[in-house]
Amino acid sequence: MRRGGSKIRILIGIAIVAFAFIKKCNNKSLNPYTDRVQNINMSADQEIAIGIQSAPDMAKQYGGLYPDQKLQNYIDLVGNKLINASIAKQTPYKYDFHLLADNTTVNAFALPGGQIFITYALFSRLQNEDQVAGVLGHEIGHVLGRHSAERIAEHDFWKTIATGASVGADAGNLVNSIGQNVLLKNGRGDELESDNLGIRFMIRAGYDPYQMIEVMQILKAAAGPNRVPEFQSSHPDPDNRIQKIKEAIQEYQGVS
Ligand SMILES: [Zn+2]
């Protein structure tokens, strides 16, 4: 009886794993802005909704919005300049830029659908408009690249696999650890793709793309032992990242 039971469990486990793979194949979609095939299981409208819904809580975690409308207007101006000059304008995303009051955490990040944030701590370290454009352009890149949606789909996939594996062979933990490695690997790719898109937006909007390299140096200098700025959170080698930025500048300046 026991042997028969475990055989059935294995079959059910295999079925769940197969289901996860079939679902993953069906979720494949070509991102028209990056020309990259991605696994995504939500619509742009859903991404926008998630972003708008989470934005107030996000802002609260960084001390709320910075209480100076003039600086906020400046952030909007730079952000909109980047959007209006680039393919970002052709997307369904609703961009919204927020200057956060936090003056100790050096950070910038994007929620799916277009909600973009920069802390005052990072903003105050930037030396010119081109560098502000570099940070915001990179974040717009995360939105266009649909990185959050991709992570969510990846997470769902590995969760289903883990369920199948734990039903079949109680190896859920093993599969879970593989899943985390995959998430981390995607993170590195996300940063490089966002850098590349950010450079593209900067050049289109008439900003000096070399200022993005200065931004990298500022972030490197700002990263204390306990601080992990978004730009360095997934740790692509900084020098490798600067090299890739230089390559992107060559690529897009040649085109325009
Ligand atoms: Zn990033």
Image (spheres, rainbow, N blue to C red):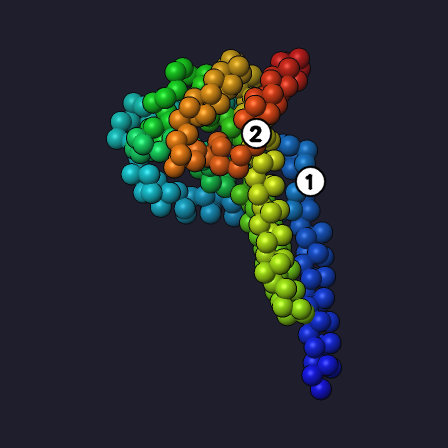
x and y percentages locating residue 86 in the rendered image: 56, 23
The part of the image, by quadrant, that contains residue 165 is bottom right
Query: What SS does tag 2 mark?
Result: loop
* Horizontal and vertical percent position of residue 133: 46, 21
- Picture quarter with the C terminus: top right
| Residue identifier under label 2 | 237
Mark on residue 96? none
- Is residue 99 among what the camera can see? no
Closer to the camera: disc 1 or disc 2?
2
Residue shown at the point (65%, 37%) measured from the top left: 31
Characterize the local packing of mark 1: few (<14), some (14-19) or many (20 or more) Cα atoms within 10 angstroms.
few
The residue closer to the viewer here, 188 or 117, is 188
Residue at 61% across, 41% down: 185
Task: Tell me which amino acid carries mark 2.
Answer: Asp
CB of mark 1 near ligand 1 (< 8 Å): no
- Is residue 154 left or right of 219 when viewed as pictured? right
In the rendered view of the protein, which quadrant contains the N terminus? bottom right
Q: Which residue is mark 1?
A: 37
Q: Give the mark nearest the N terminus, 1 or 2.
A: 1
218 lies left or right of 102: right
10 Å neighbourhood of mark 2: few (<14), some, or many (≥20)? few
Q: Secondary structure at mark 1?
A: strand
- Is residue 235 in view? yes
